[in-house]
């Protein structure tokens, strides 16, 4: 594709000038993708996330500064699968190449609520899927910066080995849970892929972060599930209020098992500054709370 390659190299030049930096600039929609992209890019690209650590990413409202930054970028990576409700409008006026990193993933469909039947967008919560993301990034970076294509592919291979190791840990460690403790109850239904990989039953208060979430009916249904299954501990995610889950705790006597990270990394000095940390942290919190061996 010589035309596309030419376009990429032209935008690379303009972006480089705008950012006053010799490296091409890659923007991602959220921090988890930025960390994966940095692992693939090494020192060759400048990677930044549009949303900051701790931000709500589904219904994010981009600022004028975000749009300025994006117009000077050389490549924008999004998750896709309807994760970023704001993304189409955000990029509509931009002449910057975009790549959807979830391309090629086998989706798990959302089981209920208004989003029933649509693919669950949280595909990165399986490190197996993350390996597909990483391959897509390596190919996109190779097209953006062909001189470093070999480095991107080699970085990707090394990082994929780490992803596979953390996947093996997750499956092995969660596999030690007794049958009756294999239930993961969270605020958002963001754990379908992790639950699938680890053989956990998944229950949540709402399917996808949106305006209509945590209705009395949704909370009542979660309470019923926790009671019926004698679930020992429940969880909520770092980017949303845990108030609805505290209602479930109050009504059932289940423990609040702790804060799980899904849609955002923490700050650098927080508990999950990288994606690998995120998966390890969530695995540890889930096991300790469900087995009662030291809840948060
Ligand atoms: Zn989410």
Image (tube, helix red, strand yellow):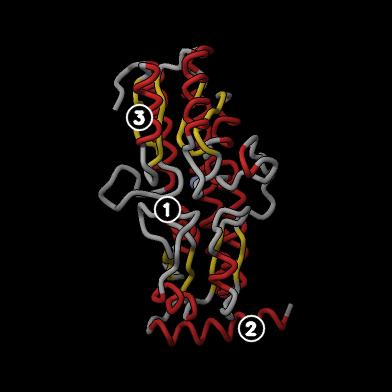
Q: Label 2: few (<14), some or many (≥20) within 10 Å? A: some
In the image, residue 29 lies at what x, y percent? Answer: 49, 61
Residue 196 lies, with reference to residue 99, above or below; the image says above
Q: Reading the chain from its start, which is encountered first: label 1 or label 2? A: 2
Could you tell whether 38 is left or right of 110 in the image? left
**Real-space Cα distance between discs 3 and 2?**
52 Å
Q: Quadrant of the N terminus?
A: bottom right
Q: Quadrant of residue 141?
A: bottom right
Q: Residue at x 43, y 47 (%)?
A: 275
Instruction: Please report contact status of discs 3 and 2: CB closer than 8 Å, yes or no.
Output: no
Q: Helix, strand, or loop for circle 3?
A: helix
Q: Reading the chain from its start, which is encountered first: label 3 or label 2? A: 2
Could you tell whether 137 is left or right of 226 in the image? right
Q: Nearer the viewer, residue 124 or 276?
A: 124
Q: Nearer the viewer, residue 253 or 272?
A: 253
Q: Reading the chain from its start, which is encountered first: label 3 or label 1? A: 1
Q: Helix, strand, or loop for circle 1?
A: loop
Read off the residue under disc 2.
Answer: 7
Read off the residue under disc 1.
Answer: 56
Q: How many marks?
A: 3
Read off the residue under disc 3.
Answer: 246
In the image, residue 273 lies at what x, y percent? Answer: 34, 49
In the image, residue 20 lies at what x, y percent? Answer: 37, 84
Residue 279 lies, with reference to residue 225, above or below; the image says below
**Real-space Cα distance between discs 1 and 2?**
33 Å
Q: Label 3: few (<14), some or many (≥20) within 10 Å? A: some
**Real-space Cα distance between discs 3 and 1?**
20 Å
């Amino acid at each position: 594709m010589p035309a596309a390659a030419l376009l990429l190299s032209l935008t690379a030049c303009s972006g480089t000038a705008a950012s006053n930096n010799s490296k091409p600039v890659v923007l991602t929609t959220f921090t988890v993708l930025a960390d994966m992209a940095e692992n693939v890019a090494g020192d060759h690209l400048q990677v930044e996330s549009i949303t900051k650590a701790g931000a709500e990413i589904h219904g994010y409202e981009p600022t004028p500064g975000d749009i300025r930054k994006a117009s000077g970028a050389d490549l924008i990576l999004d998750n896709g699968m309807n994760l970023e409700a704001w993304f189409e409008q955000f990029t509509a006026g931009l002449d910057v190449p975009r790549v959807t990193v979830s391309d090629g993933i086998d989706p798990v469909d959302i089981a209920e609520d208004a989003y029933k039947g649509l693919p669950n967008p949280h595909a990165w919560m399986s490190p197996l899927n993350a390996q597909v993301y990483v391959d897509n990034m390596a190919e996109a970076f190779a097209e953006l910066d062909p001189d470093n294509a070999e480095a991107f592919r080699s970085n990707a291979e090394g990082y994929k080995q780490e992803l596979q190791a953390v996947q093996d840990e997750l499956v092995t460690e969660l596999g030690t849970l007794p049958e009756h403790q294999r239930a993961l109850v969270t605020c958002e239904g963001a754990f379908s892929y992790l639950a699938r990989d680890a053989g956990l039953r998944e229950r949540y208060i709402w399917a996808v972060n949106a305006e209509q979430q945590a209705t009395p009916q949704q909370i009542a249904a979660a309470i019923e599930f926790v009671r019926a299954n004698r679930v020992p501990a429940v969880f909520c995610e770092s980017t949303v209020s845990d108030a609805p889950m505290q209602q479930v705790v109050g009504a059932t006597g289940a423990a609040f098992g702790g804060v799980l990270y899904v849609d955002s990394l923490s700050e650098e000095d927080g508990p999950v500054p990288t994606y690998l940390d995120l998966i390890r942290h969530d695995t540890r919190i889930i096991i300790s709370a469900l087995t009662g061996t030291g809840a948060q």
